[in-house]
Image (cartoon, rainbow, N blue to C red):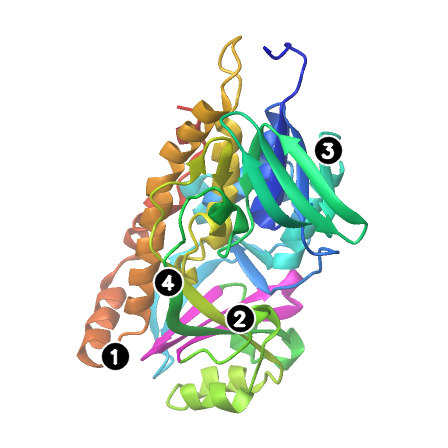
């Protein structure tokens, strides 16, 4: 039976992380009724700092989210790269006003929980979106035009049917497996991220500067920047190491500070002083994956880590999920009196997103290798960085930070 002009289509989204929440907002704007299902009984404020690059901040502004971060997100004035061994400056790249002028939107840093809260606030005010917490997906059934989710909750079994299903349920996506889209060839990258939030008054003065700092060393690197109006310093230390932890609850795996300091024992004393100020570390394994050949099957598609888990060395994981959300919404924007079919819209979405996401996956992997160089190769890297003028450094990021929204609508 043909759909009446006033009958809204229904989208189901599995996973209420950053990508799932953004997708709910984007699809609602194109006329979908959206049911968003999250297995966790509450959206806990977990995680640490997160970068919101210009290619994502413009989309968040469109979705009515960016203004909700006012007073919480911080705009660094520059990126400063240092040698881990000597502490000397290798390179700077202006951000702040220069980033806005070049890429049209700001480069921001914020706490992941603050971004999630801003998205959740926007979702809660959208009458076309319903969020169901504590709903664990147990099965999926679909044909060419309809999809049904089976779920378990504390109140009993649930079953919901829609026109579209979006799997935003992470790298170990059940939706991806149920749709027959294959297993992501994801494996442990050989690197561990150590994360901490340090009260600013406990940090050395250099770490309180309004900038993003990147330090490079053999088989290690360090990133830090201030958060929440400068009240905290977000610290991420990456080491080449084996993962010995809880794969299911990796975000709460505690790390031994002595083990981390051993990995940085030959570093500059100022960087070590920052690391020594932290007593509470969390360790996360970094997964690497090859691109998927397909993201969609029938009325089902994937988004974010379910489609393209990537290493964090371009700080694009959340940004690419946000780009996915914008492209998915744009694929169903009315272009004429005739409604875009689900399969046609998903083909359009995948066509506009898959190659770019795969490119960033590959580039992030290469960037990690460059960061962790040792010996003569590291010396060549450092010399090259010192020789680059700031404008040329910014030009190298144009492909990454340029606004993608126009491409989604063509």
Residue 94 vertical placement versus 11 (above, below): below
Q: Is-magenta flag for residue 240? A: yes
Q: Is residue 68 visible?
A: no
Q: Which of these two is toward me, 359 or 76?
A: 359
Compare marks 2 and 3 and give the one earlier in the sequence. Answer: 3
Whole-angstrom CA distance, mark 4 to mark 2, is: 36 Å
Q: Nearer the viewer, mark 1 or mark 3?
A: 3
| Within-10-Å neighbours for mark 1: few <14, some 14–19, many 20+ | some
Q: Are marks 1 and 3 in contact (CB under 8 Å)?
A: no
Answer yes or no: is residue 234 visible: yes
Mark 1 or mark 3, earlier in chain: 3
The residue wearing badge 1 is 374
Whether residue 317 is situated above or below residue 28 in the rendered picture: below
Residue that badge 2 annotates = 247
SS label for mark 1:
loop
Q: Residue at label 4?
A: 92
- State the separation of the CA atoms marked 1 and 2: 30 Å
């Amino acid at each position: 039976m043909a759909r009446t002009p006033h009958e809204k289509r229904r989208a189901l989204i599995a996973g209420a992380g950053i990508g799932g929440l953004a997708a709910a907002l984007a699809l609602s704007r194109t006329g979908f009724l959206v049911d968003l299902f999250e297995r966790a009984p509450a959206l806990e404020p977990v995680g640490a700092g997160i970068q919101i690059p210009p290619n994502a901040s413009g989309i968040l502004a469109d979705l009515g989210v960016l203004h909700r971060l006012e007073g919480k997100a911080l705009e660094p004035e520059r990126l400063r790269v240092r040698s881990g061994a000597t502490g000397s400056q290798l390179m700077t790249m202006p951000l702040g006003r220069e980033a806005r002028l070049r890429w049209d939107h700001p480069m921001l840093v914020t706490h992941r929980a603050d971004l999630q809260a801003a998205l959740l606030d926007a979702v809660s005010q959208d009458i076309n979106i319903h969020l169901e917490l504590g709903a664990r997906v147990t099965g999926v059934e679909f044909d060419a035009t309809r999809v049904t989710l089976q779920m378990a909750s504390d109140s009993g079994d649930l079953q919901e049917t829609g026109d579209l299903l979006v799997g935003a349920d992470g790298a170990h996506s059940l939706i991806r497996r149920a749709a027959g889209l294959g297993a992501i060839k994801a494996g442990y990258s050989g690197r561990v991220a150590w994360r901490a939030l340090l009260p600013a008054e406990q940090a050395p003065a250099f770490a309180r500067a309004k900038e993003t700092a990147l330090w490079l060393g053999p088989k290690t690197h360090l990133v830090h920047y201030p958060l929440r109006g400068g009240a905290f310093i977000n610290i991420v230390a990456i080491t080449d190491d084996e993962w010995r932890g809880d794969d299911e609850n990796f975000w709460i795996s505690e790390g031994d500070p002595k083990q981390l300091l051993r990995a940085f024992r030959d570093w500059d004393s100022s960087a070590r002083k920052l690391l020594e100020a932290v007593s509470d570390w969390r360790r996360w394994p970094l997964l690497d994956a090859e691109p998927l050949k397909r993201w969609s099957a029938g009325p089902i598609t994937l988004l974010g880590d379910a489609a393209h888990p990537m290493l964090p060395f371009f700080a694009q994981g959340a940004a690419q999920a946000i780009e996915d959300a914008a492209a998915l919404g744009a694929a169903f924007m009315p272009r004429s009196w005739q409604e875009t079919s689900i399969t046609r819209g998903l083909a359009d979405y995948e066509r506009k997103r898959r190659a770019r996401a795969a490119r960033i996956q590959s580039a992030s992997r290469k960037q990690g290798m460059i960061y962790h160089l040792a010996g003569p190769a590291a010396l060549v890297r450092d010399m090259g960085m010192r020789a680059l003028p700031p404008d040329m450094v910014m030009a190298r990021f144009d492909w990454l930070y340029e606004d993608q929204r126009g491409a989604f609508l063509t």
